Amino acid sequence: MDRRNARTATRVRAALSAAAVLAVVTSGGARATAQAATPGPAAAVPVSASAPDATSWTTRNVAPGVQVRSATMDNAHAEPVWTVTVQAPATGRLSGSAAWAAVGPKPWADATARQLRADGFEPRAETVRWPDYTDTPQGVMGLRVRIGRYATQADARTVAQAVTAAGFHTAVDWTGYDAEQPADRENVHVAVIDPRRFAGTVEGTHDGNVAQRVTTSSVAAEMGSLVGVNAGFFVTSDADGVQGTQSGLSADHGELESMAAGARAALIIGDGGRHVRVADLTTTVTVHAGSKSYRAQGINRVPGSVRDCGRPGGTPSELPWQDVTCHAVDDLVLFTPEFGAALPIGAGAQVVVDADGRVVSAGSRGGTVPAHGSVLQGIGAAADWLTANARTGQRIGVREDIRDTAGRHVELGRNDSIVSAAPTLVSRGRISIDAAAEGVVDPQDLSFGYAWANVRQPRTMAGVDARGRLILATVDGRQTGGSEGFTLYEAASFMRSLGAVEALNLDGGGSTAMAVDGVLVNNPSDATGERAVGGTIQVLPGHAG
């Protein structure tokens, strides 16, 4: 972001119109945006709200039926600056702990502004409105109290230090991340895969091991992928489980490898990409030993630790909460052969099951999953159940059930895969963001999820258009190169403008990556470069003969 210190307000910029975006994706080949057709019903408002000018697109026809387009969308009307935000005290609804929010109620804003003026500062109050989510309040969210407009981050930090010394809690912000004004630059990459023309396959993959982290581009290069993007949310810290394991629903080659965190958005890639759809999915896994049964609440995760929550018996909540680790004292977890790490150890019980479904050993937790078998680990009441019912030689059955919110069962074949994240962005051709239900914002706690959802960030998105074509898209954010990213609503607007009738938000931030022919094409936001992730979506060429 230091490049902004030298940026002048005279740089020529222009926003990309929704019509131009729609034309880019629906056209059969390279097409200048000046020739864009009039948008149809799927068109949305521009991502950056200003009059469109010229935006340069590059096009790669990677294979028949696979096209990648990239662009930098510039906006001449944006004038972002550095500023000091005075944060509002809050209480985390889940934790009950003191927290800070970027937005506060009007009485707090008025009192804070009066005190700042008494201390010699010149504050301003900015009204922040709720985005048009389907399940949050409408209208004013609150007020944001800020001081100054500065050309450099260093200048803003100097003022922030003085404000902090006066007894306030501050943050130094770049206003280009605010939803209330247009972004000045956004670098986007869009891949469109047409199953009627493409002879290859599309799959969600963990590259053979759910308990590892690898970069999207390295997996793409290894698999000879035409296009690859990062996929779902995953564990990033040993404190929250085994790194790389998914914190939501995933299936690889028709096998369920992790369970849903509540009813969250998922991309169902059927028949190797021939049929793709987006739906909110739930999972149920039941373990049977003779006439006895017990509900498993996890696959391939540490018993007792539920990243992103959303499982029955979890505390402090059974609902999904993004980037929160819930805990359970009674927990049964299934481990599959794709769990390539050492099994978790600790109190509880474990049984090892062979390929025929018979228990070959029972005892303490640890070791590894056999190549053609599985392992069950239990803690609390689940451990007692295993000890009582899963004895050596006992046949164990596992029944898995995946359903959408309409109650329809999702069958998995060997060429099917599922990746999930949150939230839904587009449904039935309309922007439809169930942000609260999917646990990425909390209307009762503005300290939770505000920056994650309502501030511009790097994003990875996936969807399907009315012709059944898969759309994979990324936008860079937090960039030294200048791209500021999308809010969730902007991500939804962008996907709808591309013609998506269904779309979801995948993992973003430093995870956002797109590789073409095994080479990274976007600019990830982590200072260390491309982040190693827990799963990817890969577009694989067909095999001759």
Image (cartoon, helix red, strand yellow):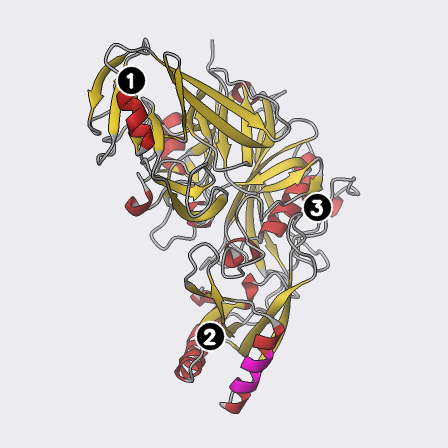
- The N terminus is located in which quarter? bottom left
114 falls in the magenta region: yes
| Range of residues picked out in magenta | 110-116
Which quadrant of the view contains residue 177? Answer: bottom right
Prevailing SS of the magenta stretch: helix
Q: Is any part of residue 377 visible from this angle?
A: no
Judging by the rendered image, the residue that carries numbered circle 1 is 390
Judging by the rendered image, the residue that carries numbered circle 3 is 20
Helix, strand or loop status at disc 3: helix
Which of the two labelled residues, at mark 1 and mark 2, occupies the earlier sequence position?
A: 2
Tell which of 106 and 248 is nearer to you.
106
Q: Residue at x 29, y 29 (%)?
A: 383
Q: Amino acid at mark 2?
A: Thr
* Comparing labels 2 and 3, the label whose residue is closer to the camera: 2
**Label 2 packing within 10 angstroms: few (<14), some (14-19), many (20+):** some
Judging by the rendered image, the residue that carries numbered circle 2 is 152
**In the image, 205: left or right of 373?**
right
Using the numbered discs, state the Cα–Cα distance from disc 3 to disc 1 in whole angstroms. Answer: 61 Å
Using the numbered discs, state the Cα–Cα distance from disc 1 to disc 2 in whole angstroms. Answer: 65 Å
* Comparing labels 3 and 1, the label whose residue is closer to the camera: 1
Tell which of 219 and 260 is nearer to you.
260
Which of the two labelled residues, at mark 2 and mark 3, occupies the earlier sequence position?
A: 3
In this picture, is 293 found above or below 104? above
In this picture, is 9 found above or below 178? below
Looking at the picture, how far across and down is residue 87, in whole percent? 49, 71
**Label 3 packing within 10 angstroms: few (<14), some (14-19), many (20+):** many
Q: Which mark is residue 447?
A: none
Helix, strand or loop status at disc 1: loop
Helix, strand or loop status at disc 2: loop
Which quadrant of the view contains residue 304? Answer: top left
